[in-house]
Amino acid sequence: MQSAKNALKLAMIIKVCRSSIPPGGTKLSRALSNVDGVCSACLLDPWWMKIGQFLSQLEANAMLRVTTVVALFFLAAPSPVGFAHGGRNIYTVEPAKGKYELLQDTWAYRGPSVETGELKPVHAGKFVVVTGATPDFVRVQLRDGTVGYVPQSAVALFRPADKTFVVSTNTGVYAGPHLGSSKLDSVRRGQNIHVIGVELYYLKIRTSSGTEGFIPVAAVE
């Protein structure tokens, strides 16, 4: 049953790819048609009856091999693949630690996206233990031990500050407290920076040009 579902999913990917082929893309079109045909056949017959035929086509057709690798990448992805500035996966959970107050009622989700599904409601005024962060969510442990993900905007993460530090290593200045956030600027070793706040393991700074953003705490002396 699972093999049939996977074959159907792969067939749908191929059909979408075929619909986007520009006029004149005959080689790619034929390669996609070959993969599409095998996937469709797998829905009718057990996969092991078609695997030999498919492997033979892979061996003989370089374009088919490339197409298959691309299709299988999307087929095998366990969750939506999203990348921010610089190609970093925005679903990467960076380490964080602390107890923070909830600013508003919201949901704890099963993963760092609303698409992962609601886990349980959480309420303003309560505290959660933060154990990690993505650009938009924090991973939290609730009082009953449940682990979920809460939108960063619903948690009082920011602590104001007003200090000057010296940068100890070159680093980017990011739009949020995560390396997957958009890169706004950069600072260099030896540069003085004005810190206006702390959020998770990041310092919020204001550069000489007026840009406000975040740098890792480890980047300053």
Image: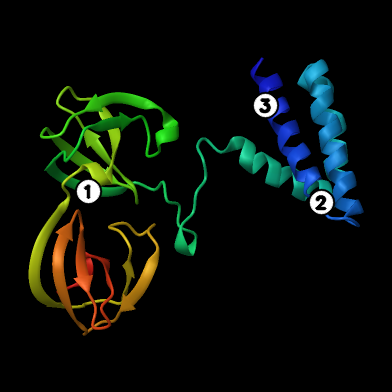
Relative side of 147 to 162, left or right? right
* Mark 1 closeness class: few <14, some 14–19, many ≥20 residues within 10 Å: some
Q: Nearer the viewer, mark 2 or mark 3?
A: 2
User: Which residue carries the number 1 mark?
Assistant: 96
User: Closer to the N terminus: mark 2 or mark 1?
Assistant: 2
Tell me which residue sits at (19%, 37%) in the image.
104
Question: Where is residue 88 drawn, in percent x and y?
Answer: 45, 57
Q: Quadrant of residue 207?
A: bottom left
Question: Where is residue 140 drawn, in percent x and y?
Answer: 23, 36
Instruction: Indicate whether 201 appears above or below 115.
Output: below
All told, the count of numbered labels is 3
Residue placed most toward the observer, 174 or 171: 174
User: Closer to the N terminus: mark 2 or mark 3?
Assistant: 3
Q: Amino acid at mark 2?
A: Ile
* Mark 2 closeness class: few <14, some 14–19, many ≥20 residues within 10 Å: few
User: Which residue carries the number 2 mark?
Assistant: 21
Residue placed most toward the observer, 115 or 139: 115
Q: Is residue 35 visible?
A: yes
Check contact, mark 3 vs mark 1: CB within 8 A.
Answer: no
Tell me which residue sits at (27%, 46%) in the image.
152
User: Which residue carries the number 3 mark?
Assistant: 6
- The residues tagged by marks 3 and 1 sit, at their Cα atoms, a distance apart of 36 Å
User: Closer to the N terminus: mark 3 or mark 1?
Assistant: 3
